[in-house]
Amino acid sequence: MDVRALAMGLAFSLMWSSAFATGRVIVAHAPPLAALSLRFAISALLAVAVARALGQSWRLAPAQWRGVAVFGLCQNALYLGLNFVALQRVEASLAAIIASSMPLIVALLGWTLRGERVAPLGALGLALGFGGVALIMGGRLSGGADPMGIGLCIAGAVALAWATLTVRAVTAGGSLLMVVGLQMGVGAAILAVVSLATETLTITPGWPLTLAFAYQILVPGLAATLLWFALIGRVGAVKAAAFHFLNPAFGVLIAAALLGEAISLLDVLGVAVAGAGILAVQRARLRGA
């Protein structure tokens, strides 16, 4: 892996991990699904406009359209939607740690649903990864963390894992920026319908909401998504996913720095164990690729 790929991976991990702390700022001032739907709508319009200016077409292959629909539903509507609702109930650091288990869930789904072989290193990684996440969740639950919020985070991570399994169908055939914009449009439409049916539009305007919302559109929304697909194109999905082992640490540190969330010794231990497990799973997949 070259220096540019390493820089891309580190930048992606920082952007991805920062979404939880800024998301918690947003849901403290606006309904989560309505805010997320608007964010996706703006991001979709920007991405599609730039894609058209670059000459990209929305006449995608059938496999790409299926991928756009599945990714828009699983990644944008379910994963982020569930996490935004959960951020009303749990701390950003806990949501980031649970979401970081996505590579472990991908490996587990591949083993249980697709019959993929799990090497000894991969099995050890799964045990360590889920053990580290469980260690943190157990400590947070005993400290009063909301079980419903944790359940929503877990459901979101499963949805993201399923979306990751479809990523090749989305990216094959080019028009990357157009694909990203269209899948955000799918997420915006789904979340708008759910928001209209379930939420009351009460907004507390101010600079915290404005800055967090703009940041979410430009950084986790557009930049991180494009960087992720570019990283996959440069080093492959398995090597790209290895950078997820940094997400638990980055998620905890960013939440502590931005929101003042406390970091316990159990959190540090759990993050280290989970990160080691995620790295072991990715190394095992790389050897088997």
Image (cartoon, rainbow, N blue to C red):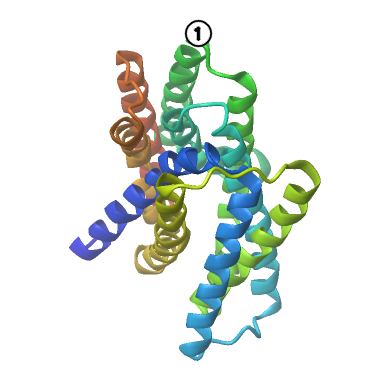
Horizontal and vertical percent position of residue 46: 51, 74
**Please, which residue is most extreme toward the right here?**
197
Is residue 75 among the parts visible in the rendering?
A: no
The quarter of the image holding the C terminus is: bottom left
The quarter of the image holding the N terminus is: bottom left
Q: Image quadrant of residue 244?
A: top left
133 and 31: which one is in front? 31
Question: Is 71 placed left or right of 117 in the picture?
Answer: right
Q: Residues within 10 Å of mark 1 (few under 14, many from 20)?
A: few
Horizontal and vertical percent position of residue 288: 43, 50
289 and 143: which one is in front? 143
Horizontal and vertical percent position of residue 154: 59, 32
At x 61% / y 19%, what residue is drawn?
Answer: 147
At x 36% / y 44%, what residue is drawn?
Answer: 283
Q: Image quadrant of residue 151?
A: top right
Question: Is 263 placed left or right of 65 in the picture?
Answer: left
Residue matched to label 1: 142
Horizontal and vertical percent position of residue 102: 51, 41
Q: Is residue 270 above or below residue 96?
A: above
Q: Image quadrant of residue 169?
A: bottom right
Q: Amino acid at mark 1?
A: Ser
In the rendered picture of this protein, how many numbered marks are placed on residues?
A: 1
| Secondary structure category for the residue under label 1 | helix
256 and 58: which one is in front? 256
Question: Is 156 placed left or right of 200 in the picture?
Answer: left
Q: Is residue 180 above or below residue 60?
A: above
Is residue 127 among the parts visible in the rendering?
A: yes
At x 60% / y 65%, what residue is drawn?
Answer: 41
Q: Is residue 38 above or below residue 158?
A: below
